[in-house]
Amino acid sequence: MFHNKNENFKKFIFFIFITILSAIYIYFFLYFERRIIGISPQYHPDSVYYFESFSNYKNLTFKQSLFNNIKHFFDHFFSNTFYLSIINLIYELHAQVTSIKSLSFFHNTFYRYVISFNIFFHLILNLLILNYYFKQLKSSAFDHKNLLFLLIILFLPFRCHLTVNILKDS
C-alpha cells in the first residue's frame, strides 16, 4: 500500500484524526438538532415506529443461542427487520446493564444506547470509507481535490442527520 513506515504512520494519524473529528462533528450535530433547532427524537414517523415496535421483531436476542440467532438472521434476511432486531438487542443489553449496580456509570436511557450504536456504526463506516479511499487512490490520496471529495463524503450533513436519529438508514 504505502512504500515506507512514514507513509503508514501518516495514514494511521490521518485515520485517528478523522475519527476524532467525526465523533466531535456528530455530537455537535446532535446538539445542534436537539437543542438549537429543536428537532425532537420522535420527529420522524419511522423513528417512532422503530422505537415502539422493535419488541415485535425479536429475530435476534441474547436469550437464544448463537446458532439460533444465526438461523433466525438468515430466515428473516429479506424481511427488512434487521435494524429492529438490533434495537431489540440493545434493549436487552440496556436492561442487563441497568440491573447491575456496580455498572451505574453506564446507566443511561435506552434511546441514548440506540443513538450511541448509530454513532459507533457511523464511525466504523467512516473508517471503512477511508480504508477504501487509500486503497483505491494510493499515490494521489493526499491530493487536495481528492481530500476535499473525501471530506465532503465523510462529513455530509444528511449522513449525520440519519445517524443521530433512530432510522435504519443510519
Image (spheres, rainbow, N blue to C red):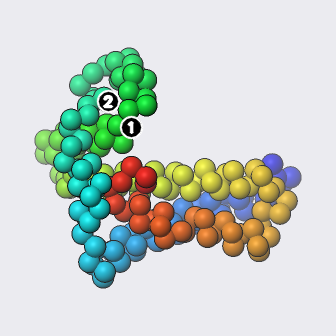
Closer to the camera, 27 or 53?
Answer: 53
Disc 1 residue type (three-letter): Asn
Q: Residue at x 23, y 62 (%)?
A: 42
User: Circles 1 and 2: CB distance less than 8 Å?
Assistant: no
Circle 1 Cα neighbour tier, 10 Å, few/some/many (<14 / 14–19 / ≥20): few
Circle 2 Cα neighbour tier, 10 Å, few/some/many (<14 / 14–19 / ≥20): many
Closer to the camera, 134 or 3?
Answer: 134
Quadrant of residue 67 in the image? Answer: top left
Q: Is residue 133 visible?
A: yes
Residue 58, placed above or below residue 24 = above
Quadrant of residue 69 in the image? Answer: top left
Question: Residue 164 at what x, y percent from top left?
Answer: 36, 62
Disc 2 residue type (three-letter): Leu
Is residue 148 found left or right of 23 in the rendered image?
right
Is residue 21 found left or right of 36 in the rendered image?
right
Residue 150, placed above or below residue 132 = below
Is residue 48 found left or right of 128 in the rendered image?
left
Q: Residue at x 60, y 65 (%)?
A: 153
Q: Residue at x 30, y 82 (%)?
A: 36
Closer to the camera, 151 or 58?
Answer: 58
Q: Residue at x 60, y 50 (%)?
A: 128
Question: Residue 123 at what x, y percent from top left?
Answer: 50, 56
Which residue is label 1 attached to?
A: 80
Q: Is residue 97 visible?
A: no
Which residue is label 2 attached to?
A: 60
Question: Residue 141 at what x, y percent from top left?
Answer: 78, 62
CA gap, disc 1 and disc 2: 13 Å
Q: Nearer the viewer, mark 1 or mark 2?
A: 1
Quarter occupied by the C terminus: bottom left
Q: Going from the N terminus, do you reach mark 1 or mark 2 first?
A: 2
Q: Secondary structure at mark 1?
A: loop
